[in-house]
Image (tube, grey):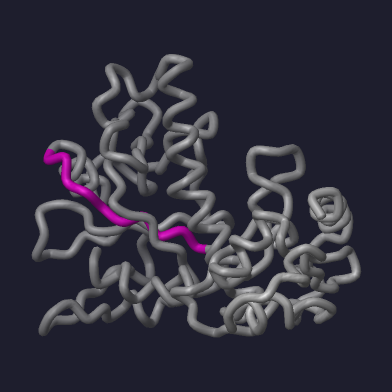
């Protein structure tokens, strides 16, 4: 998992090629199968990874915005499902690979099997270890549901959002074109706790950490026609090179847009957010 985290850090995603031969110390591990959604290495007693695709044949989905449902593989209750059931019995962590494009995945880990619902032929995957210890994971209380919904938002939605946004912007800051993925975030135009704050590419901007912080603090704004504006009071300040070149020189520039028109930031959302920026100035 440490090796996978290092591989995914730059873009938030991994390719099928990378998953087919992940270097770990002096070995290479195969984390994905070509014909199965469950990877059960013969060297391991339990499942290593499970893959979920929105276009696949199974009904994998979140349950009420909380736990993640992972359907049994077609056939009996044993077979490939046996080692995933063993992961449940052992309490061992596994890796969830969320397919977002052909041969492109967002890895989510560690993930735990919280329940084995045999009668309905699915497993419940918990995105946080604490969720495994609920009295009844299949029927959480309202307070528990709020907690696990927040965990799901942080662990699943945000990871997928970052992966999709950085791919759309070709792993560079929309404002300054910095290309170091480890220094880039997927910034929400409308916050995820607000109406219209959906975790979709059109509600996102790829921003370096300084410009993300400036955007969230209304020091930097982006107009509906994609122009970068800096808070007038900040333009009048005198400070070091970061202020001068990192912020003040960005005023009046236009952001880099995704090549795919369908991924471009939504003008209506930008307008709402830009009004807030102007009011703060």
- In the depicted structure, whether residue 110 falls above or below residue 13: above
Q: Within the image, what quadrant is residue 218 found in?
A: bottom right
Position above or below: 180 against 152: below
Residue drawn 21% across the image and 59% down it: 40
Is 118 left or right of 188, judged from the image as shown? left
Q: How many marks?
A: 0
Between 135 and 150, which is closer to the camera in this rendering? 150
Q: Is residue 11 above or below residue 138?
A: below
- From the image, give the main secondary structure of the stretch colored magenta: strand
**Residue interval drawn in magenta:** 90-99
> Image check: 19 left or right of 133?
right
Residue 1 in the image, given as x and y percentages of width and height: 24, 63
Q: Position of residue 81 (x, y in %)?
A: 26, 46
Q: Quadrant of residue 114?
A: top left
Q: Nearer the viewer, residue 55 or 27?
A: 27
Residue 39 picture location, percent across and down = 27, 61
Based on the displayed image, in which of its 4 quarters is residue 213 positioned? bottom right
Residue under the image location 82 percent in, 60 percent down: 266
> Where's residue 113, x and y in %?
28, 39
The residue shown at (48%, 57%) is 159
Left or right of 173 in this view: 81:
left
* Quarter of the C terminus within the rendering: bottom right
Residue drawn at point x = 83 percent, y = 58 percent: 270
Q: Is residue 97 magenta?
A: yes
Q: Is residue 201 magenta?
A: no
């Amino acid at each position: 998992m440490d090796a996978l985290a290092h591989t995914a850090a730059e873009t938030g995603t991994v390719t099928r090629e990378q998953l087919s031969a992940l270097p770990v110390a002096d070995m290479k591990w195969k984390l994905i199968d070509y014909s199965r959604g469950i990877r059960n290495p013969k060297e391991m007693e339990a499942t290593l990874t499970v893959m979920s695709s929105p276009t696949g044949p199974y009904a994998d989905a979140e349950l009420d915005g909380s736990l993640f449902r992972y359907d049994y593989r077609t056939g009996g209750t044993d077979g490939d499902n046996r080692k995933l059931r063993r992961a449940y019995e052992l309490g061992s962590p596994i890796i969830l690979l969320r397919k977002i494009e052909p041969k492109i995945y967002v890895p989510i880990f560690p993930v735990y099997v919280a329940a084995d619902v045999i009668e309905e032929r699915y497993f419940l995957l918990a995105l946080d270890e604490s969720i495994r210890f609920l009295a009844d994971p299949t029927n959480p209380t309202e307070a528990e549901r709020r907690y696990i919904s927040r965990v799901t938002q942080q662990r699943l939605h945000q990871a997928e959002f970052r992966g999709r946004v950085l791919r759309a912007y070709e792993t560079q800051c929309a404002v300054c074109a910095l290309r170091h993925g480890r220094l880039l975030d997927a910034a929400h135009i409308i916050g995820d706790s607000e109406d219209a704050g959906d975790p979709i590419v059109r509600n996102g901007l790829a921003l370096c950490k300084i410009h993300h912080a400036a955007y969230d603090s209304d020091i930097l704004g982006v107009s509906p026609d994609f122009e970068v504006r800096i808070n007038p009071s900040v333009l009048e300040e005198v400070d070091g090179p970061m202020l001068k070149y990192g912020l003040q020189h960005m005023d009046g520039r236009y952001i880099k847009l995704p090549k795919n028109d369908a991924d471009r930031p939504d003008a209506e959302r930008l307008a709402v957010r830009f009004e807030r920026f102007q009011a703060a100035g």
